[in-house]
Image (spheres, helix red, strand yellow):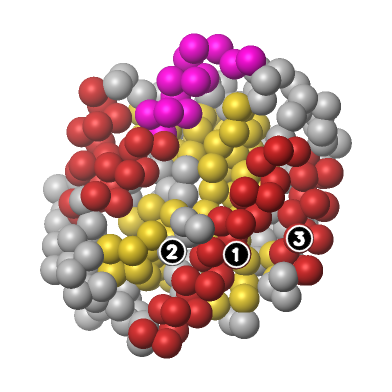
């Protein structure tokens, strides 16, 4: 039995408002993502922007997460906790924003290059951004969720990078994380059917080295086991009768 929620047009409209706000937080913070700023300062700027827009930063206190955004630097795959670390030229940093606007959620992330980065870092970030759009292009109304991971895997394999398996996309809307779980890699399972009114994220995490991750002692920060660089991009999507809409574009 499918537990995947089908949202009404009115609900989808409100999720889209949350999505647009989340995207606008990334646009707002981008010029601040420079060498010398601490991830705590980025967190405070985003927190204040979200609250000024009458929304709640969803990560704050979510299962005990202590900050309002996730900042994942270099070998950090996801769920990096903002702190006193100062960004330096050559770093890559993913900023992941989730807002709760009137009870509905929008979730989006981008990986930013700080100053002058290596060719490897530039290439990894570019391929990861493209991998997200390859996944989005694989979403067809009345298709299957397994189509997404299959398309991303084919693309990423070609470029010699690896796809994280321990973290996935998720249903979103009236909850932060709901059904289904969206794999970014290929499996033998077709997965559930994709139906109009469904709302979910695609958020591939791509590593320059191996796919394996581990969580640090803070119980949140996920890093690559081999210390290789990791990048991620995320959008929130809604399925309509004929297409898929990206709700976290402005
Ligand atoms: N925004 C993340 C995602 O894309 C989840 C962060 S959970 C947190 O699903 F608690 F770490 F904030
Ligand atoms: Co997400
Ligand atoms: Co997110």
Q: CA distance from mark 2 to mark 1?
A: 10 Å
Residue located beneath label 3 in the image = 49
Question: Which numbered dot is residue 176?
Answer: none
User: Looking at the image, which residue is at 36% across and 43% down?
Assistant: 132
Is residue 110 positioned above or below 242 on the image?
A: above
User: Looking at the image, which residue is at 71% across and 38% down?
Assistant: 31
Residue 87: quarter of image: top right
Toward the front, the furthest residue is 250
Is residue 193 visible from the viewing direction of this image?
Answer: no
Left or right, residue 72 beside residue 188: right
The residue carrying pointer 1 sits among few (fewer than 14), some (14 to 19) or many (20 or more) residues within 10 Å by Cα, namely: many
Residue located beneath label 2 in the image = 247
Q: CA distance from mark 3 to mark 2?
A: 19 Å
Q: Quadrant of the N terminus?
A: bottom left
Left or right, residue 103 beside residue 244: right
Mark 2: secondary structure: loop
Is residue 214 positioned above or below 25 on the image?
A: above
Q: How many marks?
A: 3
- The percent coordinates of residue 81 (x first, y second) are 72, 45
First reached walking from the N terminus: tag 3 or tag 2: 3
Question: Between 28 and 93, which is closer to the camera in this rendering?
Answer: 28
Residue located beneath label 1 in the image = 21
The residue carrying pointer 2 sits among few (fewer than 14), some (14 to 19) or many (20 or more) residues within 10 Å by Cα, namely: many
Question: Between 132 and 192, which is closer to the camera in this rendering?
Answer: 132
Left or right, residue 190 beside residue 215: left
**Where are the magenta residues, as a range?**
116-128
């Amino acid at each position: 039995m499918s537990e995947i929620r089908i949202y009404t047009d009115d609900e989808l409209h409100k999720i889209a408002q949350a999505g647009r706000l989340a995207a606008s937080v990334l646009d707002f913070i981008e010029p601040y993502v420079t060498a010398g700023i601490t991830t705590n300062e980025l967190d405070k700027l985003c927190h204040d922007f979200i609250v000024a827009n009458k929304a709640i930063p969803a990560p704050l206190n979510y299962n005990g997460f202590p900050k309002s955004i996730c900042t994942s630097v270099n070998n950090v795959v996801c769920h990096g906790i903002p702190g006193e670390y100062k960004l330096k030229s050559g770093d890559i940093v993913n900023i992941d924003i989730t807002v709760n606007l009137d009870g509905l959620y929008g979730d989006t992330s981008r990986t930013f290059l700080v100053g002058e980065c290596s060719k490897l870092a530039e290439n990894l970030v570019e391929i990861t951004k493209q991998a997200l759009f390859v996944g989005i292009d694989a979403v067809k109304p009345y298709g299957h969720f397994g189509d997404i991971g299959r398309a991303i895997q084919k693309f990423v394999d070609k470029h010699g990078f690896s796809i994280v398996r321990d973290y996935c996309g998720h249903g979103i809307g009236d909850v932060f994380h709901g059904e289904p779980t969206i794999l970014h890699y290929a499996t033998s399972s077709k997965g559930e059917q994709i139906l109009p009114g469904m709302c979910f994220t695609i958020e591939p995490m791509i590593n320059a080295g191996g796919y394996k991750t581990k969580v640090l002692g803070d119980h949140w920060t996920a890093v690559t086991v081999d210390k290789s660089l990791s990048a991620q991009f995320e959008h929130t999507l809604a399925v309509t009768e004929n297409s898929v809409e990206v709700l976290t574009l402005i």
